[in-house]
Image: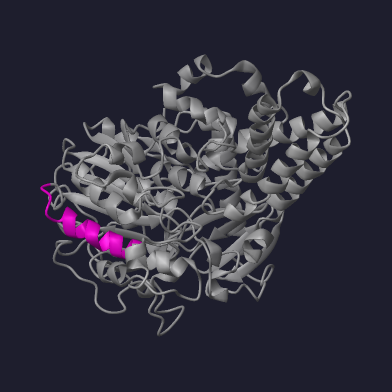
Amino acid sequence: MGVEIVNHWYLVLLAAVLIWALWRLYFTPRIDIAHQSLKRYYALQVPSLIVGAVMCVSGIRGGLLNHWHQYLLAIPIAYIAHRLYHHRRQQLSGLALLAVAAILVLTAPIGGFRHRDIRPVALSSAAEYTNHPTETALVLNTPFSVIRTIGKSVFNDPGYFSDKDELESIFTPVHRPDAKTAGSEKKKEETGHSPALSQPSEGDSGHSLQQPTADSRPSSPNVVVIIIESFGREYIGALNHEMLPGYEGYTPFTDSLIQHSATWRYSFCNGRKSIDGMPSILSSIPMFVKPFVLTPQGLNRVNSIASCLKEKGYETAFFHGARTGSMGFNAFAHSIGYDHYYGREDFNNDSRFRGDDDFDGYWAIWDEPFMQYFALKMSELRQPFTTALFTASSHHPFRIPEEYKTQFEEGPLPIHKCIRYTDNALRRFFDTAKKQPWFENTIFVITSDHTNMSAYDEYKSDIGGFCSPIIIYTPSGIVTPGMRDGIAQQIDIMPTVLNLTGYDHPYCAFGIDILNTTAADTWAVNYLNGTYQYVDGKYVLQFDGKNVTALYRLGDWKMQHNIAGTVAEQQQMERRLKAIIQQYMDRMTGNRLTAE
């Protein structure tokens, strides 16, 4: 209890302010009490005060069961309300009433009695009720829009390049599949044996892996993207043989799956929050400055895996085990082309499952039953389809089902047991999926939304905090298993998947096709507290928007040796990063996030 109070000190402070306001009322007579019966007074006043206390104490975080200690603060508040009846009767202090009202006004919209995972509405929430971005103005309230946008210029043209042709020559996010380029990256012409037969030898960099051709690529493969909450690369033993020799990790099933999948020596996420994950993974839009969905530009037209493949006749569906509306996932999923959304309510309505008996009491349906629902529900979709799943169980407060508490032991960090549980849920998902008729002709992509708690200093650094897995598994063998040399990032998933499906129209994506790009031409970019980080095959460059602030060797995971100004490649890296930033800003402000 003491630790929780310290961790949520702001809630205690909020409650203290409320108690102080009520204590002031203790010396201030109430109005109209002489004309009310005692029973009526208690029936109206005491519940209203308790309601106010609950809203203030739980408004930011919520959770009666998980923050029960905070609700104890409602007891003295109720006592004060009782005492108020016995004191002088005169005009209620306007200032005291104003203070209480202000607290309620400020905290109730944040949460109050609403479910803790339902965020306050943003402009992008309008996308849930429209089919096209141009229609969102019809459902947005004008005063609300003004309040949310006034004085908030998030994206601005940095003016690094006045010559637009020069800018395009350095970097462009427009992909034209019929050309010899992927984004601005030069594709590698590869030859070799069938991808299903060719296996890289131990220590092979993966450069000899063949890109699937029209003959080897199956017709219209299904695409399944699994986004695992907080599933940092640190937790996966198979991805840490080089950085942490002898380390086993907490994911025995994922370790075994990696032996049959394509992975990369270096792989990164493009944001640090759950709301950054979906744009990065599904629409190839990294997080710069502020989460995309929280900005006015969140209403821009964008490409996505779903919107592109829907043009080719794919059925599209998004799955998340929380209530519909949680984190605004349903609104964003709808805006980028997912026609169906399946959440906690849909799971509860499926008689094959136990409904809210499998609710974790905090966020969502436990991962294991919801992944089973996911596997079976996909068998009801028309092929070809593309789906995305966003899991939830490896999230604070880091709980697992009661029946698994003895099976999955605690690790050094609270999240470790949750990672073990979700890894096992993933194993059971594939046990069910491989029995389904769609399994063999499916491309599976597994990644995380972001990273989380770290036990090792290598993963606590500015760049280590972005290390996420990117795993591509194809039962049919169209992508050869192996650890490839080079860099992968979340924004590479969309162009890579579209190429694997044979998508042949222009589209906008800030990433590259990592299965068809040489290791030397791979890169990653992310943004942390005002600093852009650009990673290439040798270095990590940090840039504050005006100047390079640091440069580290990629293997210097603890970032202890700043070698800025001593490396010839620094100037070229800075130039490339500036081009990426300017393309991002120009296209955000100009609503040019599609190839049209």
Q: Nearer the viewer, residue 261 or 158?
A: 261
In the rendered view, does 448 fall on the left or right side of 180? right
Task: Give the percent coordinates (x, y) of residue 263.
Answer: 33, 64
> What residue do we see at 35% from left, 41% from top?
344
Counting from the top left corner in percent of width and height, residue 104 is at 70, 33
Numbered circles on residues, count: 0
Q: Residue furthest bottom?
A: 246
Say which quadrant the C terminus sits in. Answer: top left
Give how far across and how far down residue 505 sits, in percent.
30, 34
- Colouring style: one colour
Q: Can residue 133 be seen in this view?
A: yes
- Taking the image as shown, residue 56 lies to the left or right of residue 18, namely left
Which quadrant: the N terminus?
bottom right
Q: Main secondary structure of the magenta part?
A: helix
| Left or right of residue 327, residue 533 in this image | right
Locate residue 575, reporting x and y percent. 60, 52
Q: Nearer the viewer, residue 295 or 522?
A: 295
Name the residue rendered at 43%, 22% in the picture: 129
Magenta-drawn stretch contains 174: no
In screen coordinates, is 535 left or right of 1? left
* Residue at (41% x, 68% y) in the render: 417
Of residue 199 and residue 42, the one placed in the foreground of this image is 42
**Which range is magenta?**
422-437
Whether residue 153 can be seen here = no
Where 500 falls versus 553 (above or below)?
Answer: above
